[in-house]
Amino acid sequence: MKNTLIALATTAAMMTSAHAASLTVVGADCDASKASVTAIALNCGSTTDRLASDNVNLGSADGSFYSLGLASDGSDVGGALLMQITPGFTGSMLVVEVTNPSKHWEAAAVYVGNSIDEVIANLTGGFSIGTLTNGKGGSEAAINSVIVPGTFTYVAFQDISRQIYGDSSVGNRTTDGFDIDALSVEAVPVPAAALLMGSGLVALGASRRKKKLG
């Protein structure tokens, strides 16, 4: 698992080095310190480290994670996590899930939008851009890649472990849903025109300083 996390961190650094992005948790159903995303009654993690949504890192997998939560009534769809990424993201999104060798079979759906209302509407309507899975558990962290169809500023993950893998009647022992450690994105690039304007302003400032000093 350690080697997997190192490989992810290296890939993440390559994806975000050109244009830095920042992540803010907007809502998390199993984190009492955040706003609720859905109105679903959930079975959340039994330990405090699984309930801290700020454990999710942008581009840096470290073994700390957040559990999305399972519907307490046995429904297929569970808890959600909603985040804002600035200045925005596009292209490929890489997500790492922490998995211990077990029969904890877990999955999550990914939703995007350019406002909170839009991403919530997509989540409610089931308009997912992809599915993440842990491959029915294993000895290493499960890494998933999702292609983002456009440019967006919000992303949400919702647990669909039972929908994908079934419940305890078929052997699924998950108790708190999909566990997210980190995600990496391709940050929206600064437009070429803006870069040229910026370099022009720097050059102009340098020219003015030179004349003043001379």
Image (spheres, grey):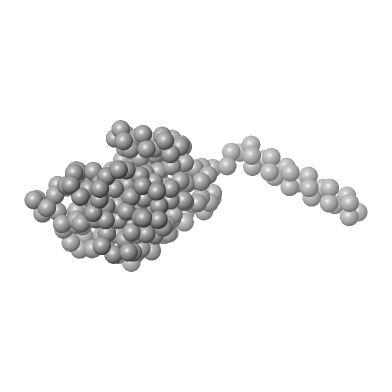
Give the x, y percent position of residue 142.
Answer: 28, 55
Q: Is residue 48 above or below residue 134?
A: below
Please state which of residues 90 and 57 is positioned toward the viewer in this rendering: 57
Can residue 90 be seen?
no
- Which residue is at a point 25% across and 48% down the rendered structure image? 41
Give the x, y percent position of residue 51.
Answer: 33, 59
Q: Looking at the figure, which quarter contains the N terminus?
A: bottom left
Q: Looking at the figure, which quarter contains the C terminus?
A: bottom right
Please state which of residues 97 and 155 is positioned toward the viewer in this rendering: 155
Q: Is residue 120 above or below residue 178?
A: above
Residue most toward the bottom?
2
Residue most toward the right?
214
- Which residue is at a point 88% across and 49% down the rendered structure image? 211
Place residue 97 in its image quadrant: bottom left
Please state which of residues 42 and 21 is positioned toward the viewer in this rendering: 42
Q: Is residue 89 above or below residue 50?
A: above
- Which residue is at a point 38% across and 64% down the rendered structure image? 62
Q: Is residue 21 left or right of residue 1?
A: right
